C-alpha cells in the first residue's frame, strides 16, 4: 500500500494541512481530540472535499484539485469503520455484513465471507436485528461489513472509543486477527496510545491540523506526548499459566512471571507500568515481591523528569522508569547488570 | 340521515380521486424538496423554505386565485399548456393541482423532519461501502424516513379531501366534473332544504378522514414492528 497525501482544507476557525507519504500496511494516526484526525479521514474517504492538493492511493489519483479529479466515495475503495458502528438499523446483521460486498464487482471480492464471519465470531448473530447487539458486537459487525466490501485501504476512526474498557479489549484480538489474516492495509485513528500500540507499529503524530511527525509506535510510547505524562506501560503477551496454589506462573517467552491469582486464568495481554519496576544492583536477599529478573541494561533515555531504562530479560525487553539520581548512584549504563523486581499484583490484564 | 344521491356518490369518488392523484403527484416533488432542505447546503434555503410553506399560511382562496392567474388562458403556464391543447381551469386537473399545491407544505414538512432525524453517518457509511448516491437514496435514506413520509402522505391526503378555497376558484363547482365533497356540502348549504343532505355528506367526510387516519396509524405500527 502506498498512500500519498498533500492536501489543504480551510474551515472558518480551523485550517488543516496534511503532507505525508505512507508505505506501511498498518499505520496509526495519533493526536488529541480536535487535531483534525476525523477531517483527514473524511478527506481520504471522499466525504469532505479538500480545498486543494492531491491524494493518491497505490498510484491512482483519488483527488487532484489542479486536474479537477475528485473520485466519489463509492468509487475510492476506501472503507471506513466509524466510531459508533453506524449499522443500518433497518437491516439484519447479515444484510449489514453483505451491504458493501453486494456492491463490489465479483472479480474484486477477494475475501471469503464465511472465513471472516468465523474470525469475527459472528455466526450466531447473523439473523439478529442490529438493535439487539451489544456495543462490542456492533463494532465487530461494522468491521466485517467494511472488510467484506474488499477495500484497498480501511480507515478505522476511533472504533473503540465508544466502548467500555472490557469490551474494548475483547475487540482488539478480533481486529488483530482480521488484519493479520486478510492482510488489509489500514489507517487506525485514535487518541489512545494503548489502542495504537496494540494495533500499529508506525504512527503519524498530529498537532493542530497538521502532521507533526512520523515515528514508530514504540518510540511514541516512550515520550510524554504519547503516554500523557503517566509513564511508560509495558505490554506483555503471556501464555497460559500454571496454577501454583496462591499464584499463577505465566510464561513470557523464556521468562517466568508470577501473577496474582484471578478467575480468568488464561493466556492474554497484560500491562505493567514502567514506574512499578524496581531496579537492584544485586539480587535482594528477601523481598515480598514475587518477580526478580536478572537483566542487562540495553540503553537509557531521558523523559521529562525520569529516566527510561531499557532492559534485556532473556529474550524479552522491559522498560523501567526511575529517577535520575538512582541512575547516577547505581551507575546504570548500557551493559550494566541489574535485577528488576515487580510485585505479582503489578500486572493488569488487558484481555 | 338522508340517503345519498348519485351526485353525492360522484362527489365522493371525485374527492378520493383528487386526493389520491394530488398525493401521488406531489410525493416525488415533496421528497426532493425535503431532501434539498434537509441535506443540502445551498444558499437561499430560507427563501426556498418560505416559498414552499407559503400555501400553508396564505388563505386558500388567494392560492386559488394565483393559480388561476398562472393556469388561466393568459397565464404563463396556461398559455404553454394551450399549445398542447391542455386546459386546466374548470377541470378535474385543476382540482388536483389546487389540492397538490395546498397540501404540499404539509408533505414536505413531515418528510423533512424525518430526514433531519437520520444520522448522516449512515449515509456516509453507505457511500464508503460502494453505494452510489441513488443507491444510498433508495437503500438507506428512503427506508429510514418511510414513517415520516407516510405521515406526510396521510396529512396531505386528508388535507386534499377537505380542500375547498383553491379548488372552487381554479376548478369551479361543476357537479360530476369538479365537485368534490366540500364543494357539494357548500352547494347544499346554499340551497333551501339542503341541510340534511349536507349533514349526510359531512358524516361521510368525517368517516373517510377517520378511516385514512386509522389506516395510516395501522401501517405505521406495522412498519415500526418490522
Image (cartoon, coloured by chain):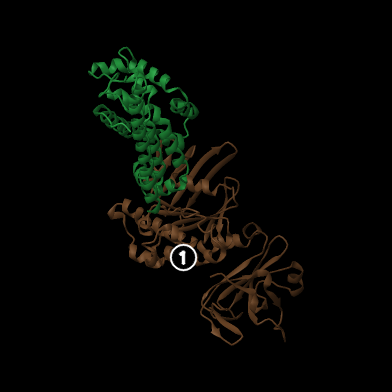
Chain colours: A brown, B green
Give the structural element (helix, strand or loop) at label 1.
Answer: helix
The image shows residue A103 at horizontal and vertical percentages of 32, 50
Between A261 and B119, the one nearer to me in the picture: B119
Q: Is A135 situated left or right of A301 in this image?
A: left
Q: Quadrant of residue A46?
A: top left
Residue sticking out furthest to the left: B85
Q: Is A270 situated left or right of A68 in this image?
A: right
- Residue shown at 33% from the left, 33% from the top: B1
Q: Is A309 situated left or right of A12 in this image?
A: right
Q: Quadrant of residue B163?
A: top left
Q: From this viewpoint, is residue A61 visible?
A: no
The image shows residue B73 at horizontal and vertical percentages of 30, 13
Between A128 and A3, the one nearer to me in the picture: A128
Looking at the image, residue A75 lies above or below residue A106: above
Q: From this viewpoint, is residue A80 visible?
A: yes
> How many tags in the picture?
1
Between A3 and B168, the one nearer to me in the picture: B168
Residue sticking out furthest to the top: B74
Looking at the image, residue B137 lies above or below residue A110: above
**Disc 1 marks which residue?**
A176
The image shows residue A75 at horizontal and vertical percentages of 36, 46
Q: Residues within 10 Å of mark 1 (few under 14, many from 20)?
A: few
The image shows residue B197 at horizontal and vertical percentages of 32, 28
Q: Chain of mark 1?
A: A
Amino acid at each position: 500500500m502506498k498512500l500519498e497525501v498533500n492536501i489543504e482544507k480551510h474551515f472558518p476557525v480551523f485550517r488543516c494541512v496534511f503532507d505525508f507519504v505512507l508505505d506501511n500496511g498498518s499505520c496509526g494516526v495519533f493526536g488529541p481530540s480536535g487535531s483534525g484526525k476525523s477531517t483527514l479521514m473524511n478527506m481520504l474517504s471522499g466525504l469532505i472535499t479538500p480545498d486543494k492538493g492531491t491524494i493518491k492511493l497505490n498510484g491512482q489519483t483519488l483527488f487532484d484539485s489542479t486536474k479537477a479529479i475528485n473520485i466519489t466515495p463509492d468509487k475510492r475503495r476506501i472503507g471506513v469503520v466509524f466510531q459508533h458502528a453506524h449499522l443500518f438499523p433497518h437491516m439484519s446483521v447479515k444484510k449489514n455484513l453483505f451491504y458493501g460486498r453486494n456492491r463490489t464487482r465479483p472479480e474484486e471480492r477477494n475475501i471469503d465471507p464465511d472465513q471472516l464471519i468465523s474470525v469475527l465470531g459472528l455466526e450466531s448473530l447473523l439473523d439478529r436485528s442490529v438493535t439487539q447487539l451489544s456495543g462490542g458486537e456492533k463494532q465487530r459487525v461494522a468491521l466485517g461489513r467494511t472488510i467484506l466490501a474488499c477495500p484497498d485501504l480501511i480507515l478505522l476512526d476511533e472504533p473503540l472509543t465508544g466502548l467500555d474498557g472490557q469490551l474494548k479489549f475483547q475487540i482488539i484480538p478480533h481486529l488483530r486477527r482480521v488484519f493479520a489474516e486478510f492482510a488489509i492495509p489500514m489507517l487506525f485513528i485514535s487518541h489512545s496510545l494503548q489502542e495504537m500500540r496494540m494495533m500499529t507499529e508506525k504512527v503519524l503524530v498530529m498537532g493542530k491540523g497538521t502532521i507533526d511527525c512520523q515515528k514508530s509506535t514504540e518510540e511514541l510510547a516512550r515520550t510524554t506526548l504519547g503516554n500523557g505524562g503517566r509513564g511508560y506501560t509495558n505490554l506483555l503477551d503471556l501464555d497460559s499459566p500454571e496454577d501454583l496454589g496462591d499464584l499463577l506462573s505465566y510464561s513470557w517467552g523464556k521468562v517466568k512471571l508470577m501473577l496474582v491469582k484471578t478467575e480468568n486464568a488464561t493466556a492474554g495481554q497484560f500491562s505493567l507500568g514502567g514506574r512499578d519496576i524496581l531496579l537492584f544492583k544485586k539480587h535482594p536477599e528477601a523481598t515480598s515481591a514475587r518477580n526478580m529478573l536478572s537483566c542487562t541494561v540495553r540503553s537509557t533515555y531521558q523523559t521529562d523528569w525520569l529516566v527510561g531504562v531499557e532492559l534485556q530479560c532473556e529474550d524479552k525487553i522491559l522498560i523501567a522508569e526511575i529517577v535520575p539520581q538512582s541512575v547516577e548512584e547505581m551507575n546504570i549504563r548500557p551493559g550494566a547488570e541489574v535485577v528488576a523486581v515487580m510485585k505479582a499484583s503489578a500486572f493488569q490484564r488487558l484481555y | 340521515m338522508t340517503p345519498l344521491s348519485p351526485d353525492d356518490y360522484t362527489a365522493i369518488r371525485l374527492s378520493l380521486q383528487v386526493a389520491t392523484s394530488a398525493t401521488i403527484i406531489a410525493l416525488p416533488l415533496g421528497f426532493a424538496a425535503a431532501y434539498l432542505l434537509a441535506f443540502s447546503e445551498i444558499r437561499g434555503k430560507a427563501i426556498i423554505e418560505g416559498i414552499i410553506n407559503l400555501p400553508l399560511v396564505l388563505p386558500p382562496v388567494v392560492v386559488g386565485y394565483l393559480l388561476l392567474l398562472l393556469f388561466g388562458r393568459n397565464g404563463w403556464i396556461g398559455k404553454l399548456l394551450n399549445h398542447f391543447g391542455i386546459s386546466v381551469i374548470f377541470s378535474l386537473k385543476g382540482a388536483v393541482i389546487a389540492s397538490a399545491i395546498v397540501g404540499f407544505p404539509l408533505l414536505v414538512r413531515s418528510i423533512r423532519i424525518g430526514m433531519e432525524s437520520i444520522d448522516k453517518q449512515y449515509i456516509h457509511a453507505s457511500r464508503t461501502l460502494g453505494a452510489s448516491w441513488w443507491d444510498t437514496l433508495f437503500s438507506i435514506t428512503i427506508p429510514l424516513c418511510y414513517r415520516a413520509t407516510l405521515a406526510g402522505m396521510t396529512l396531505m391526503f386528508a388535507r386534499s379531501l377537505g380542500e375547498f378555497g383553491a379548488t372552487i376558484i381554479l376548478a369551479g363547482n361543476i357537479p360530476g366534473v369538479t365537485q368534490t365533497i366540500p364543494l357539494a356540502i357548500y352547494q347544499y348549504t346554499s340551497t333551501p332544504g339542503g341541510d340534511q343532505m349536507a349533514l349526510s355528506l359531512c358524516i361521510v367526510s368525517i368517516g373517510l378522514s377517520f378511516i385514512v387516519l386509522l389506516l395510516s396509524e395501522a401501517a405505521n405500527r406495522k412498519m415500526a414492528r418490522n
